[in-house]
C-alpha cells in the first residue's frame, strides 16, 4: 500500500466529518491530492478551570479542531481522548471531562487523530480547584462555621494557636498516615477552632471545640480527608493553620501557618520496631504499616517478658530477635514474619548463647552476627559469620579479632560495615569507636577493614563523646548514616547522665561527615539515636530522588495532652535525605515527621524497614492478608479447608504486595514483593 493510499483511507471518513462541521462552510475540501493533510490538532478550550465543592463533580466538554496544510481549521472527532493521570477525574470518548470530587490538581488532556506517518495529537490543560468542609463532629456546635465566616479576623500572637505538630518545613511521603495536628493548649473551655489546610489546588476546612473535659488541643485528620489533601498535593507544599474564637469572643484570631511538603511518590512496606513498656513492664517487637499506621505485636509478650535486639532480612520475610521467655538464658530465634500467628514459627534457632545483632546478606544466604566472646561477658562482643539456612557458625576470613558490633550489610551485597572498638551488648559502649567498611569477597572472605569515620574526631561536637555506632546503608549503597555521641545506647545508667547523640551521613569511601541538623528536629540535635534507612526511594517530579531515614528521639512530639511533651519518652521519627545535596557537602536532611501509629504511652525505638512480608503462591495461608497476591483460597474445591495463596482475581495496584509482575496492574513491575517499587540500584 502506498503512502498516498493509506492517507486517503483515513481522509475519506474525515472528509465527511469536515462537511458536517467546518468553520468556512460549503463543501468539504478536496482530498484527492493530499492538500488537506492535517498538520496540527487544537483543543478548545486549551485551558479549563473547574471548581469542585464538597464532593461535586463538575464537567466540561472539549472540542478538537484540525489545522490542514492549506490553513483550514475544521472540527473533527478524535479517535481517542486520554488523561496524563486519573487522579482528579476521567474523560469519555466524546471529550467530556468529569471531575472526581476527591482531589484537586492539574492534568493534561491528549486527543489523537490519524496522520500520514504518525498520529497527530493536541493537548489541553484542566485544573480542578477543590474545596471541602469536613462534616461536623456531634460535639461541635452547628453554628460554628457561620461564626468563623462572619466574625472579623485579627492577628493576636499571644491569643493565636501555636502549632506544635507537624514541624515547620517537614517533608513526608505522599502516602504517609494521616497526622494529628497539635497545638499549645489554652486552659479555657468553650474555645472554638477552625483548621484550614491548603494546597495549590485544594482548601479543606474542619472545626473542633473545647468541651472542657476531653479536649486534647489537637485535631486528628481522618484518613479519607487526608487522602483528599495528599492527592491534591503530589510533590507540592501544604499550608496548615488553626484559627481560634476564644470563649465568649467576638473575633477570629488567625493562627500562624505551618508549611510542610508531600513527595510525589509514596513509601510502602512494614516497619518493625522495639517497644519498651513500663505499665505493664515488658518489651516486644511491633509490626506497623508505614502507610496506614496500623500496628500489631509480633511476639505477643506478656507482662514481664522481653523481646528485642531484632534484625530483618532484606526481603522482610525473616526476623531475628533475642528473647528471655524460652528458658533461664537469653536466646535468639529467627522467625517467619509471613505468619499471622503470635509468636510466629521459628525458621532457625533458638540459639544459646544469644546473638545481639544480625545483618542478613541481600539473598539471605549469609548472616553477619555479633555475640559475646564468652557467656559470662555479655558486654564484650565480636563478629561471626552464620549460614543463612541453618544458623551454623562458619569459617570466615577478614573479620575483626577485637571488639566489634552493630554489623550491617549493604543492599548491593558488595560490602559490610560495623562499629569497631566497642561492644553492642545491653549496656552498649562509651569507648572511642570507629565506623569501618569491608568488601565482601568470594569464599566467605572479607577484605581489609577501612575506617570511614573515627568517633574521636567529633569529640568537640555539640553532643560530645567519641563513640560512633549504629551504621546503616543508604538504599543505593553509597552512603552510611551513623550515630555519634557519649554512648551507643540511649538508656540512662544508674546515677549517670542521660546519653547524648547526633546523626551523621558519610560516604562509604570516608571523608568529612555531614551532621543532619535539620532532620533531627527542634529537640533532636543532641538526642537522636539508631538511624535506619528505608529501602524505598521516592522519585520526584523534577527527576530528583529522596531517601528516608528513621531514628528515635526523646524530643517532644506535640503537646502533653495528645503527644509526649514533657515526658522524654522515646519515639520514632523519619527524615527525608536528598543524596544530591549530600554529594555537594550540604546538609541533605529535612525536618522530620512522627511515624504515625505509635503508642505515645510507651518507648518506641529501633525501627527496621522492609517490604511488606508475604507468602508466595501455593504456600499455605489462613487469610488473604498473608499472601503476596492478596488471595487466600482453596486450590481444590474438594478440599475447601486446605487454603493456599492463589493468583489475584483483581490486579494489585502500586504499593500492594505481589508474587510476580503478572499480579500487578497496568504493567507495573513486582520488585521486593511490592507492585511499582523501583529498586535504587
Image (spheres, helix red, strand yellow):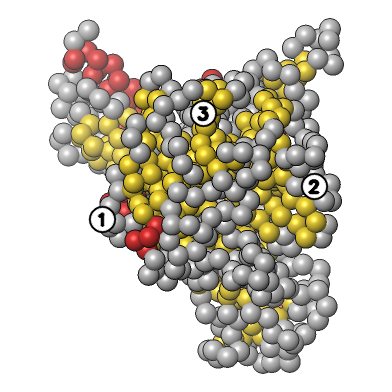
Numbered marks: total: 3
In terms of secondary structure, where does tag 1 sit? loop
Residue at the spot of label 3? 385
In terms of secondary structure, where does tag 2 sit? loop
Q: Position of residue 449 (x, y in %)?
A: 35, 39
Q: Can residue 130 be seen in this view?
A: no
8 left or right of 632 in image: left
| Residue shown at the point (75%, 39%) measured from the top left | 329
In terms of secondary structure, where does tag 3 sit? strand
Image position of 240 with respect to 327: above or below: below
| Residue shown at the point (59%, 69%) measured from the top left | 498
Image position of 93 with respect to 24: above or below: above
Judge depth for marks 1 and 3 and give the one in front: 3
Residue at the spot of label 2? 305
Residue at the spot of label 1? 584
Q: Can residue 156 be seen in this view?
A: yes
| Residue shown at the point (74%, 77%) measured from the top left | 209
- Position of the N terminus, as image quadrant, is top left
Image position of 348 with respect to 458: above or below: above
- Position of the C terminus, as image quadrant, is top left
Graded by Cα atoms within 10 Å as few (under 14), some (14 to 19) or many (20 or more), the crowding at tag 1 reads few
Q: Distance between the residues labelled 3 and 2?
A: 29 Å
Mark 3 and mark 2 lie on one chain; the one further toward the N terminus is: 2
Q: Position of residue 457 (x, y in %)?
A: 34, 61
Amino acid at each position: 500500500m502506498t503512502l498516498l493510499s493509506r492517507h486517503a483511507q483515513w481522509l475519506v471518513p474525515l472528509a465527511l466529518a469536515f462537511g458536517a462541521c467546518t468553520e468556512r462552510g460549503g463543501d468539504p475540501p478536496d482530498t484527492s491530492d493530499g492538500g488537506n493533510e492535517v498538520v496540527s490538532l487544537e483543543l478548545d478550550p486549551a485551558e479549563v478551570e473547574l471548581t469542585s465543592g464538597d464532593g461535586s463533580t463538575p464537567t466540561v466538554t472539549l472540542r478538537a479542531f484540525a489545522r490542514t496544510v492549506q490553513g483550514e481549521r475544521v472540527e473533527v472527532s478524535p479517535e481517542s481522548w486520554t488523561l496524563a493521570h486519573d487522579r482528579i477525574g476521567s474523560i469519555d470518548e466524546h471529550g467530556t471531562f468529569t471531575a472526581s470530587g476527591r482531589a484537586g490538581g492539574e492534568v493534561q488532556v491528549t486527543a489523537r487523530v490519524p496522520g500520514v506517518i504518525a498520529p497527530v495529537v493536541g493537548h489541553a490543560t484542566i485544573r480542578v480547584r477543590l474545596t471541602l468542609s469536613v462534616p461536623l463532629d456531634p460535639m461541635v456546635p452547628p453554628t460554628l462555621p457561620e461564626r468563623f465566616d462572619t466574625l472579623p479576623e485579627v492577628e493576636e500572637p499571644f491569643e493565636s494557636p501555636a502549632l506544635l505538630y507537624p514541624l515547620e518545613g517537614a517533608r513526608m511521603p505522599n502516602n504517609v498516615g494521616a497526622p494529628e495536628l497539635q497545638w499549645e493548649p489554652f486552659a479555657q473551655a468553650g474555645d472554638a477552632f477552625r483548621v484550614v489546610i491548603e494546597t495549590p489546588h485544594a482548601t479543606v476546612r474542619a472545626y473542633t471545640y473545647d468541651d472542657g473535659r476531653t479536649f486534647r488541643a489537637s485535631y486528628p485528620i481522618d484518613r479519607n480527608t487526608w487522602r483528599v489533601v495528599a492527592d491534591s498535593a503530589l510533590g507540592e507544599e501544604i499550608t496548615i493553620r488553626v484559627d481560634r474564637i476564644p470563649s465568649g469572643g467576638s473575633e477570629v484570631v488567625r493562627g500562624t501557618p505551618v508549611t510542610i511538603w508531600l513527595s510525589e511518590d509514596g513509601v510502602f512496606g512494614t516497619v518493625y520496631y522495639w517497644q519498651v513498656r513500663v505499665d505493664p513492664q515488658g518489651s516486644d517487637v511491633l509490626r506497623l504499616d508505614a502507610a496506614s499506621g496500623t500496628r500489631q505485636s509480633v511476639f505477643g509478650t506478656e507482662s514481664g517478658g522481653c523481646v528485642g535486639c531484632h534484625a530483618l532480612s532484606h526481603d522482610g520475610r525473616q526476623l531475628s530477635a533475642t528473647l528471655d521467655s524460652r528458658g533461664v538464658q537469653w536466646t535468639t530465634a529467627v522467625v517467619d514474619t509471613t505468619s499471622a500467628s503470635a509468636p510466629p514459627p521459628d525458621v532457625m534457632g533458638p540459639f544459646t548463647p544469644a546473638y545481639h545483632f544480625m545483618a542478613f546478606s541481600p539473598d539471605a544466604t549469609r548472616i553477619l552476627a555479633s555475640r559475646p566472646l564468652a557467656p559470662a561477658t555479655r558486654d564484650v562482643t565480636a563478629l561471626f559469620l552464620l549460614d543463612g539456612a541453618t544458623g551454623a557458625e562458619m569459617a570466615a576470613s577478614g573479620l575483626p579479632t577485637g571488639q566489634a558490633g552493630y554489623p550491617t550489610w549493604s543492599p548491593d551485597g558488595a560490602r559490610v560495615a560495623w562499629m569497631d572498638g566497642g561492644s553492642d551488648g545491653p549496656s552498649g559502649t562509651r569507648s572511642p569507636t570507629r565506623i569501618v567498611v569491608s568488601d565482601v569477597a568470594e569464599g566467605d572472605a572479607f577484605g581489609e577493614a577501612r575506617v570511614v569515620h573515627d568517633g574521636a574526631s567529633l569529640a568537640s561536637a555539640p553532643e560530645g563523646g567519641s563513640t560512633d555506632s549504629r551504621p546503616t546503608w543508604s538504599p543505593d549503597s553509597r552512603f552510611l548514616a551513623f550515630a555519634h555521641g557519649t554512648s551507643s545506647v540511649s538508656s540512662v545508667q544508674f546515677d549517670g547522665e542521660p546519653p547524648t547523640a547526633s546523626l551523621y551521613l558519610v560516604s562509604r569511601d570516608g571523608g568529612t561527615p555531614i551532621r543532619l541538623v535539620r532532620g533531627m528536629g527542634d529537640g533532636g540535635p543532641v538526642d537522636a539515636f539508631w538511624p535506619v534507612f528505608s529501602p524505598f526511594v521516592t522519585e520526584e517530579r523534577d527527576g530528583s530522588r529522596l531517601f528516608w531515614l528513621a531514628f528515635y528521639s526523646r524530643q517532644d512530639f506535640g503537646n502533653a495532652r495528645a503527644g509526649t511533651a514533657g515526658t522524654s519518652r522515646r519515639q520514632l521519627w523519619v527524615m527525608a535525605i536528598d543524596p544530591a545535596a549530600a554529594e555537594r557537602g550540604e546538609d541533605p536532611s529535612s525536618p522530620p515527621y512522627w511515624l504515625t501509629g505509635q503508642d505515645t504511652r510507651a518507648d518506641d525505638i529501633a525501627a527496621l524497614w522492609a517490604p511488606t512480608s508475604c507468602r508466595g503462591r501455593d504456600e499455605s495461608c489462613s487469610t488473604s492478608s498473608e499472601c503476596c497476591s492478596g488471595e487466600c483460597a482453596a486450590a481444590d474445591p474438594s478440599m475447601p479447608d486446605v487454603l493456599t495463596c492463589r493468583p489475584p482475581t483483581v490486579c494489585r495496584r502500586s504499593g500492594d504486595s505481589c508474587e510476580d509482575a503478572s499480579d500487578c496492574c497496568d504493567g507495573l513491575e513486582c520488585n521486593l514483593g511490592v507492585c511499582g517499587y523501583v529498586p535504587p540500584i
